Image (cartoon, rainbow, N blue to C red):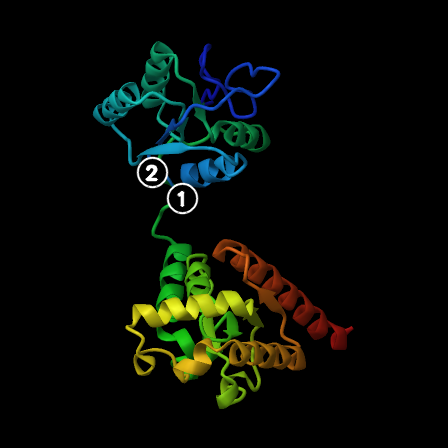
Amino acid sequence: MYNLSPLPGPVLPVGLPLRTYPRYPQPMSPNINLHLVSDSTGDTLNAVARAAVAQFDDSRIIYHRWSLIRTRFQVHKVIDGIEAEPGPVLSTLMEKGLRSELELACQRLGISVVHVLDPVLSLFQEQFGAAASTRPGRQYVLDQDYFKRIDAIHYVLSHDDGQAQAGIAEADVILVGVSRSSKTPTCFYLANRGIKAANIPLVPALGEPDALANPHCPVIGLSIDAEALIDIRRNRLRMIGGNPSAGPRHDSSDYVDQDAVKAEILWSKRLCARRGWPVIDVTRRSIEETAATIVQLMQSWETRRAKSTAAPQA
């Protein structure tokens, strides 16, 4: 079985402090060098590091990202970088020889290193009764899920902003909302999870879109605070040179007029309420948080549909 236990010294598993902390907080150094060492793309380490650093308000981190580290020569370059700009190390290296070289170098330099996957792998080894594979990048394979994500991205490109409404029947979810309410970036984020997301703009002057007359999948509204929306739209107009004809389908004055924008948002909310579509306020939400909420709403919709389908049979 693959031995995941760390070496003595500053090499510690996740869940234990890297050092003994003083009773009272000490002034932080101006900057902390954080080295992220991965034998694959580094996405896992980036997510872990961002989640942890976000818990510290005054953190000043200089990230050093080392990805696709799969040879001794590459590890030596990483060690040289750590020695030149010392700082803690987070690692997802799986190959035992490379891990050992990195750990020994960090011990020599008096630098702490954490293998972030070790606790999870140890847990699964106990549960499965089998040793973990040490092959890097196994989550990135050209399998069915991979091609599903690619297909979903192509779908979003073809069905953005109400385009190709004939293909709406293939959507897993439809996002609706006023112009510049983050529908498109949210759809692309969902596509990276293999979800085919279409988006249709809600424009009071055009009325309710025909494609939404009898939707076959969840329809979810995205709403935003009027002031925030006006700021986004003004920036949009500046980007396109202030020429309304080159951008949105609205008159430029209505597009950023406070009363007109408020009326537009109110109309879209009332439409969603009348049709029973849930609405997410994206004003202070990240794309990731919005997408997570959408997935939850999709699951709830599927559960309700399954129950309604099973009810007549009962």
Residue 282 in view? yes
Q: Which numbered circle lies on residue 259?
A: none
Q: Is residue 145 above or below residue 115?
A: below
- In the foreground, 268 or 2: 268
Q: Nearer the viewer, mark 2 or mark 1?
A: 2
| Residue 150 on image: x %, y % | 36, 61
| Residue 279 on image: x %, y % | 61, 69
Q: Residue at x 42, y 70 (%)?
A: 233
Spatial separation of the CA atoms under disc 2 and disc 1: 9 Å
Residue indicated by mark 2: 40
**Quadrant that contains the C terminus:** bottom right
| Residue 270 on image: x %, y % | 64, 80
**Which amino acid, mark 1?**
Gln
- In the foreground, 168 or 114: 114
Residue 38 in view? no
Q: Quadrant of residue 148?
A: bottom left
Q: Is residue 227 left or right of residue 164?
A: right
Which structural element holds mark 1? loop
Instruction: State yes or no: discs 2 and 1 in contact (Cβ < 8 Å).
Output: yes
- In the foreground, 249 or 4: 249
Q: Is residue 241 left or right of residue 5?
A: left
Q: Residue furthest left?
A: 73
**Which amino acid, mark 2?**
Ser
Residue indicated by mark 1: 139
Which circle's residue, 2 or 1, is located before the other in the chain? Answer: 2
Q: Residues within 10 Å of mark 1 (few under 14, many from 20)?
A: few
Q: Residue at x 40, y 59 (%)?
A: 149
